[in-house]
Amino acid sequence: MAYQNTQEIIWIERVLKTVLVGIFIWSIWAISQYAPNYYQEQKQIEVKLAETYGISQDVVSTVQCYQGYLHYPNSEMFSGLLAVSPSIQCDSATLKQQKENRYSLEYFASIFISAVSVLLLFAFQVKSEGSRQPVNKSEHINQ
């Protein structure tokens, strides 16, 4: 059974749209707050890893521990991992912990919330336009 009170439906849609716009604005604010911290922390992590393992900062962001040695992805002729030369021993758990960014959850959550709120706003807009009945002006004139 469909709900028939159109005035209340319109009011509920407006409230939901207002809440979604508020969530979208909040998420944009959150992105602006966490993005600088996230990227600054990421740069500090790269510098620290480069100093710790004695490797170039160019490969630090992609470096990973495979079979107890540091490797980086090969971007040349084939896909796969190449060992860092000279071979540098590592521990997977330690490297993962060292690469962890404490702002990543907040930063990516705010991006996700922003994207979801935009999609929901778009869905409400499409639904609202689809539910409106086109008015036939000739019928009003004839009456």
Image (tube, grey):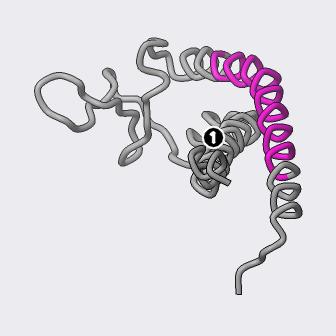
The residue positioned 79% from the left and 45% from the top of the image is 20
Disc 1: CA contacts within 10 A as few (<14), some (14-19) or many (>=20): some
Answer left or right for 126 relative to 70. Answer: right
Extreme residue toward the front, this view: 142
Image quarter (top left, top right, bottom left or bottom right) of the N terminus: bottom right
Quarter of image, res 95: top right
Q: Is residue 3 magenta?
A: no
**Percent position (x, y) of residue 18?**
85, 43
The residue positioned 41% from the left and 45% from the top of the image is 68
Q: Front-most of 82 and 113? A: 113
The residue positioned 87% from the left and 60% from the top of the image is 7
Quarter of image, res 43: top right
94, above or below 16, in the image: above
**Percent position (x, y) of residue 35?**
72, 22
Q: Is residue 30 magenta?
A: yes
**Percent position (x, y) of residue 72?**
35, 30
Answer left or right for 66 relative to 49. Answer: left
Image quarter (top left, top right, bottom left or bottom right) of the C terminus: bottom right
Answer left or right for 56 relative to 137. Answer: left
Tag 1 residue? 115
Extreme residue toward the bottom, this view: 1
55, above or below 130, in the image: above
Range of magenta residues: 16-43
Identity, as a three-letter code, of the amino acid under mark 1: Ala
